[in-house]
Amino acid sequence: MMAMEICGCDMASDLPSPTSRVFETSWRRGTAQNDTRIVPEETAIALVYDKATEAVMMATPADLEDFGVGFSLTEGIVQSAGEIRDLEVVRHPLGVEVRMELAAAQREKADTRRRFRAGPAGCGLCGIESLEAAMRGLPRVRASLRTDSETIHTAMRALSGRQELNRETRAVHAAAFYAPEDGSIVVREDVGRHNALDKVAGALARSNRRAGDGIVVLTSRVSVELVQKTAMMGASVLAAISAPTALALRVAEEAGICVIGIVRDDGMEVFTYPERITRG
């Protein structure tokens, strides 16, 4: 069980809204019309460990407790959520700070990889200072979930039906964890696809759920950073609406992850470990 405590301070309740309504002039069929539109917010989120900043990411200011825990896990700062002794979300004039206190054994590790750089949304390697760090060695995923094509389609449909922020804005990514055993799904959305996956990782850890028991589902292309984060979560099946990169597939092969792309109503493409997917 986790020893972490989530702060319920008043400052955390004053977070920015994840969306804003803006004025626009829309052109349709050659006619201009003044209107309004809901767009997602993009906020600087500082990940702070024991009063030192590790990274600053541009993200949607929602589910930030999940984001803090998930980032800590997928970046290897902690091995389990229980190593985060305390977590506090605090509004700052320039953004939001997710302040975490680490167990003593993890503090030195965090000190060695301090980054202090801002990472734009959509960049999962921002602030990494060396090629070795960017191409870090990954643990081989122990799980080897086997499933069928219909389950993959069911997972993608379930994600599509839960993208509430994207229905409002048409401008954010989503990531999800789908459990075939009971059909449950955990969905998180963000302007950054890596942030969305980190939020899912954090949500699973905070509820003591094993990623190896289900399928990671994405609304984006499969880049190497997303494969790396999936491996750190311990999930062995990754399905996406778009295609993977060649590097992502090489890393997935080494990490033991089955990658499925181009998931559409009429089919899908399995790129690694195809023997794990049977016809539905």
Image (spheres, rainbow, N blue to C red):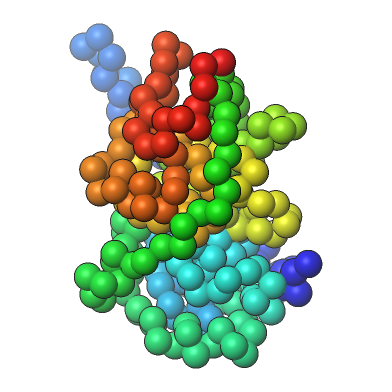
- The answer to which quarter of the image holds residue 163 is top right
Q: Residue at x 45, y 14 (%)?
A: 265
**Is residue 266 positioned above or below 20 on the image?**
above
Frontmost residue, 84 versus 227: 227
The image quarter in which residue 70 lies? bottom right
Assign the N terminus to one quadrant of the image.
Answer: bottom right
x%, y% of residue 124?
A: 35, 58
- The residue lying toward the viewer, choosing from 146 and 121, is 146
Locate residue 119: give its quadrant: bottom left
Q: Which residue lies furthest to the front in this view?
A: 275
Q: Residue at (56%, 15%) from the top-left corner?
A: 280
The one of 139 and 244 positioned closer to us in this rendering:
139
Q: Is 30 above or below relative to 148?
A: above
* Whether residue 18 can be seen here: no
Residue at the spot x=60%, y=77% of the render? Answer: 100
Residue 125: give x, y in percent of width and height. Answer: 31, 62
Q: Which residue: 40% across, 21% down? A: 268
Residue 88 pos. (x, y %): 64, 73
Determine whether, in the image, residue 115 is placed left or right of residue 99: left
Residue lying at the far right in this picture: please name it. 1
Examine the rendered structure and indicate whether residue 102 appears above or below residue 22. Answer: below
Report if residue 30 is visible in the image: yes
Q: Where is residue 197 in the image (x, y as percent from the top left)?
A: 49, 50
